[in-house]
Amino acid sequence: MALIEASDQEKIRELFKELDGEVTITYFTQRESPLLIPGHECQFCKETRELLEEVASLSEKIHLQVKDFYRDEAEARQRQIERIPAFLLEGKARGRLRFFGIPAGYEFSTLIEDIRRLSRGETALSPQTQQQLQSLQQDLHIQVFVTPTCPYCPRMALLAHALAMASERVTADVVEISEFVDLAQRYRVQGVPKTVINDQLEILGAVPETRLMQQIMQTFAPEAAQSSQASQSQR
């Protein structure tokens, strides 16, 4: 039984006709086994793979690569994949876009829009944001904690992934937090979306692009932020 309803598959297939370049999904999972090893269970690995297979089948420009988290440990470590299910999206992007957990519910729309943007090289970011990203002098690791039932989460998830598309200094993760209790406890996630950047900056809720970049620049590039504010005040 398909996870994506036939009517929705047809709508997505039509949307994917507009894809330009190739998009690769590299999925890290574990092979199915009747023997469960404590600490190695992956509750949604099977469903996530089935969902990604169905999405990839809707366009010849989408390629799915499946990796075993334990057998391909070196590659997982190189790509900084520390938990599963997890997958990377690669296309016309400078940075890294990753998902941890199954992209279900509202986050399914994030996956579909990410594919469209990666194929076409579209970020929808303002020129000011792109200029600010170019002025960054350090790498950013953005984690957006979401749940499938949160209608506001895709907005923040797509914004984070757009920043990663535009800058090689940005790695943006969308994390389905209910699957990873340890992260929920570590980052004290009591509501979503919650965004954490470099374990220093925490942002609650879905904020506009300008506000997110303002906080990023003030925290990680204060001199550039002050210079920008000064130039604007002189106009």
Image (tube, rainbow, N blue to C red):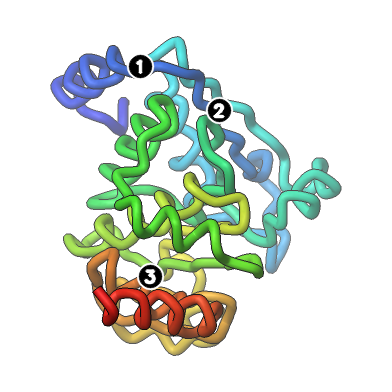
Q: Is residue 51 visible?
A: no
Choose top left, top right, bottom left or bottom right for residue 4: top left
Secondary structure state at the residue bearing disc 3: helix
Name which residue lies at 82% across and 42% down: 71
Dot 1, how many residues are within 10 Å of its Cα: few (below 14), some (14-19), or many (20+)? some
| Of 179 and 112, the residue lying toward us | 112
| Of 150 and 167, the residue lying toward us | 167
Choose top left, top right, bottom left or bottom right for residue 118: top left
Dot 3, how many residues are within 10 Å of its Cα: few (below 14), some (14-19), or many (20+)? some
Secondary structure state at the residue bearing disc 2: strand
Q: Where residue 88 sits in the image (x, y, percent)?
A: 57, 43
Q: Where residue 158 sits in the image (x, y, percent)?
A: 34, 52
Mark 1 or 3: the one toward you: 3
Mark 2 or 1: the one toward you: 2
The residue furthest front is 234
Badge 1 amino acid: Leu
> Is the residue under label 3 in contact with that under label 1 (CB below 8 Å)?
no
Mark 3 or 2: the one toward you: 3
Q: Label 1 belongs to which residue? A: 58
Q: Label 2 belongs to which residue? A: 24
Q: Is residue 70 above or below residue 134?
A: above
Locate the N terminus and report the quarter of the image it occupies.
Answer: top left
- Mark toward the start of the polypeptide (3 vs 2): 2
Q: Is residue 195 left or right of residue 147?
A: right
The residue furthest right is 74
Badge 3 amino acid: Met
Badge 2 amino acid: Thr
- Mark toward the start of the polypeptide (2 vs 1): 2
Name which residue lies at 19% across and 16% down: 10
